[in-house]
Image (spheres, rainbow, N blue to C red):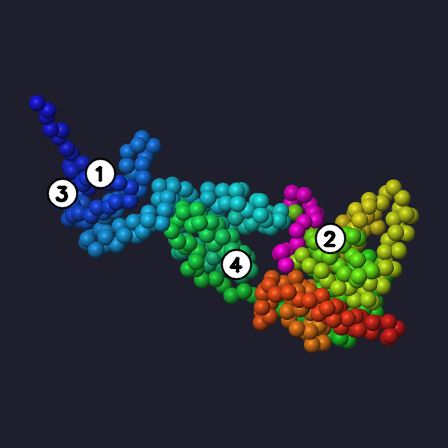
Amino acid sequence: MPTKTSETKEEKSKPKGPRRANGEGSIHKIKEGKHKGKWVAQVTIGKRPDGKPDRKTFYGKGRAEVKEKLKAIMDELAQGVNLQKQGVLTFGSWIQTWMDDYKKVSLRLSTWETYDRLIRIHIKPALETYTLRDLDTGHIQRLYNKMIENGSSSATVRKVHQIIDSCLAKAKENRLIAWNPADSVELPKLESKKVRAMTTDEMTKFLSVLKLDVWGVGLLTLLGTGLRIGELLALEWPDIDLRKKIIHVKRAMMRTKAKGLVLGEPKTPRSVRDIPIPPYLAAAIRLYRIKQVKGRLASGEKYQDNNLVFCTSKGTKIIPRNFQRKYYKLRDDTGLPNDLNLHSLRHTYSTRLLEQGENMKTIGELLGHVHVDTTGRYTDVLPETKRKAADQINQLLKKKASQK
């Protein structure tokens, strides 16, 4: 006759109940053992490697308390959240998976390197050991607060938040979490760096010192088209149609740790665009091209022909920082104020157009902006409208010639 197996006090204190299918839960009051008098809820969240049920158990002082906890778990299971994986997968492991499997194929190399650097310096040291189940809003908020205390700019904090938020959004999409704890954080206000446009007098003064060399024509192109510096230095001669007076922006130059200066996709999809060239600028580019060809022939075999519009005397890429240094030297030699940085040329371009009555939608299209406040997003601008804008900037550029 079979005998009963004796139970220890600890075994007796464990919650008892019928075997339940995945997602089914139970609640009861413990009558003995170290948890005597407490209420316990238990739910099966899957199977262990040995095939036995994997149950999640939690305790409370009252039935209502554990019932609320059980409901939250049941809701997650109903959404298909993988609670087993959620409890063992660390955020550090997941963010590395997210970078390698999801972002490496979609980000520009320079952007991927920026993400990787911010993850190594800020995110992993603070959050990598938390499991996805345990990571909460408070952990993320404390990271941001500490970054501010340690002197990080609000822009850096917001970039770190962009990474964390996107990473956790993908975890939610993959049913590893039911909600994104980064959604509820408080972010610091963005410190706006004031960029000032040149006045018309400053612009005329600056134009008067520009020569028909790589620096002069390059700066004139920035001022006459609103190009970004990376877009300017990535231009190849087939991108410029001098007959139709159009620049086709197809790529941008960027610095990477792995490959140095590379030509890749522009900043955003909207950055791929056509920009009409003011006739005055088109004439300057024609003369500059003749000089470049003569210089290339004089250099002979030493010249590395990369077909770049703006390049060194040897045909190689111009380092953006060197281009900036040349601008600052010209600015200082001209006696212009120090608050006019290189980006001021792009700002001046848009400001002059606005002053001439051009609408914000057209200006946004010409600048390649993704978001243009008050103008609407993703709306087409007719080529005739762009041409009108180019004609208006052309009249201002021609002032240089008339004042010589």
Element under disc 1:
loop
Residue 330 is situated, as x and y percent measured from the top left of the image, at 79, 64
Q: Earlier in the sequence, mark 4 or mark 1?
A: 1
Location of the C terminus by quadrant is bottom right
Q: Position of residue 302 (x, y in %)?
A: 86, 43
Please name the residue that numbered disc 2 is placed on: 234
Q: Which mark is residue 158?
A: 4
| Residue 133 horizontal side relative to residue 333, left or right | left
* Marks 3,4: beta carbons within 8 A: no
- Residue at the spot x=85%, y=63% of the render? 283
Q: CB of mark 3 within 8 Å of CB of mark 1?
A: no
- Residue matched to label 1: 19
From the image, tell me which residue sits under label 3.
32
* Magenta run includes residue 221: no
Q: Which residues are magenta?
A: 257-270
Q: Amino acid at mark 3?
A: Glu
- Distance from the alpha carbon under mark 1 to that under mark 2: 66 Å
- Callout in the foreground (2, 3): 2
Task: From the image, state whether disc 3 or disc 1 is nearer to you.
Answer: 1
* Cα–Cα gap, marks 2 and 4: 29 Å
Label 2: how many Cα within 10 Å (few below 14, some 14–19, many 20+): many
Dot 3 alpha-carbon crowd within 10 angstroms: few under 14, some 14 to 19, many 20 or more: some
Query: Nearer the viewer's eye, disc 4 or disc 1?
Result: 1
Q: Is residue 195 visible?
A: no
